[in-house]
Image: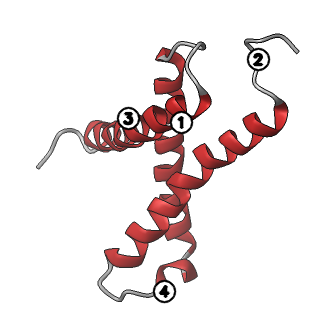
Amino acid sequence: MTPLTIPNTRRTSADLYLIGIPVILLFILFFIDEGYYDLRWMREPGNWVVFLVYWVAMVLGEFLVSLLLPRSWSTTRKMCIICGAGIPLGAVLILGFLTFVSGFSV
């Protein structure tokens, strides 16, 4: 193992955090979205499609931010910046995509 590589166990746990944090955030948002404050949204397949679209956008935002960070930074520092900037970037990406798809109509 060279000094610049991350051990597999630490990298795997970092990957799980980067995948899991958007899932947890989206579960909270979907929980409070309809005003029911329960998990009724899980019964509809269409809601799962929307959940998946938002999750993919957030993970894509995290991935794009991770490409900009230097490899020399610590894993903890990179994780904080990737989640802190990548998730909002993913939200902006999905809002931009939805605006584009809707034809910029208000």
Q: CA distance from mark 2 to mark 1?
A: 16 Å
Comparing 15 with 80, the one in front is 80
Sequence-wise, the earlier of marks 4 and 1 is 4
x and y, in percent, of residue 17 in the image: 62, 48
Q: CA distance from mark 2 to mark 3?
A: 24 Å
Comparing 53 with 92, the one in front is 92
Instruction: Name the mark on residue 5.
Output: 2
Badge 2 crowding class, 10 Å Cα cut-off, few under 14, some 14 to 19, many 20 or more, is: few
Is 91 rendered above or below residue 42? above
- Front: mark 2 or 4: 2
Badge 3 crowding class, 10 Å Cα cut-off, few under 14, some 14 to 19, many 20 or more, is: some
Q: Residue at x 76, y 17 (%)?
A: 5
Sequence-wise, the earlier of marks 2 and 1 is 2
- Tag 1 near tag 3, CB within 8 Å: no
Badge 4 crowding class, 10 Å Cα cut-off, few under 14, some 14 to 19, many 20 or more, is: few
Is 74 rendered above or below residue 13? above
Name the residue beneath numbered marker 3: 85
- Front: mark 4 or 1: 1
Sequence-wise, the earlier of marks 4 and 3 is 4
Which quarter of the figure has residue 38?
bottom left
- Front: mark 4 or 3: 3
Sequence-wise, the earlier of marks 1 and 3 is 1
Name the residue beneath numbered marker 4: 40
Q: CA distance from mark 4 to mark 3?
A: 30 Å
